[in-house]
Image: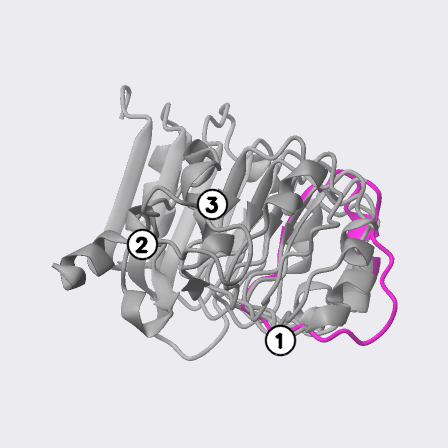
Amino acid sequence: MPFIQNLTIENTWINSSFMEVLLKNVWMSSLYDLAFVNITYHEDKPDGFQFRTINHTVNVRSITFNGVHHYQYSYPTINISTEAVYNLAYLKFSGSGMNILPCKLISALPSLETLDLSDNLLKDFGFWWFQCSNTSVFPKLRKLYLSKNRFSSLSFISKKTHQMKTLESLDLSFNSIELDKACSWPAHLIELSLGNNNLGNSVFKFLSSNFERIDLSKTGITAITQENLSQFPKLTHLKLSSNSIQVIPADLMAPALLSLYVDQNAITSISREVFPGLPRLQTFKAGSNPFVCSCDSYWFVTVLNKSMLPDWPFDYTCNTPPLFAGLPLSEYKTGGLQPQHPGEISPVTHRQVLQLL
């Protein structure tokens, strides 16, 4: 395989004997990226998979296992030379039923920058196994994806991340995270995803002031306050999608914030007073909310810079009053007279004009 750089093997049956031969050829080639997708693995030898040291420069930098079905209901036996994976920068082992991280894997990958173990059966002590020596834990790891597992204790996880001296991004979405005790996060961790965990409004108290990117989508939050945001002076990206937030307070102050997601909440209108406190905001996603088509919404349609809204106009519709339900917010117009106080002339939409005719 002298000219191939990327190889993907998918939807097939692989036994340990074939895997040994395949990897020997891969390791001797110029291949850079190797992926296995939706495979069934069968150990056809008593000693399982054995891969010894080879005297050759290994070019492979990325290995992906995405969907591994085990023919035998037992832990596979895998012995591989650390030299064969010494230069590995990316490793994904997803959808495999893994519930214990092998101890050797923790210290045998000194060049690893991204580790994706999403969609497995890992728990707190399955990833940080007590029998493992943690003297050298992924010394170059920057991104760790643990989504769709069974992690629970946020305080335990925060403590263990101190062992990973270069970790910048951690994904804990779709787990069973609990806010059990105070958390202690390392200063070098700047991105955290906790989406799809039932956490509630108190979650902000368990986060780090060093975080720059936070994803709290679908976490049971009902309100966002200035007190919450003031804890994160470096915050640039905040996702609060799919919660139950009703109001974006006018006193919000987040000078560094570049991106704010509040789509799929319970917001009925957005005040123009919100934006002066967000001077650097470039992306504002607020679609799929139950907007009230009234004077409070008129400025949003006519004044706000729509280039900030990645989901405009399709995800913005009137919810109430009933006369305008389903009307795209972009079609909400006044009849040339914008009311200033209750009792003055109300806005007239195209729909009303048609009804009058």
Indicate which disc residue 274 carries: none
- SS for dot 2: loop
Pointer 2: what residue? 348
Pointer 3: what residue? 300
- SS for dot 1: loop
Q: Quadrant of the C terminus?
A: bottom left
Compared to 21, does 203 lie above or below? below
The answer to whether residue 290 is left or right of residue 86 is left
Q: Which residues are magenta?
A: 159-187
Pointer 1: what residue? 198
- For marks 3 and 2, give the CA distance: 16 Å
Which mark is in front, 2 or 1? 2
Residue 314 placement (x, y as % from top left): 30, 50
The answer to whether residue 300 is left or right of residue 245 is left
Residue lying at the far left in this picture: please name it.
357
Identify which amino acid the numbered label 2 is placed on: Val
The answer to whether residue 349 is left or right of residue 86 is left
Residue 356 placement (x, y as % from top left): 17, 61
Q: Quadrant of residue 237?
A: top right
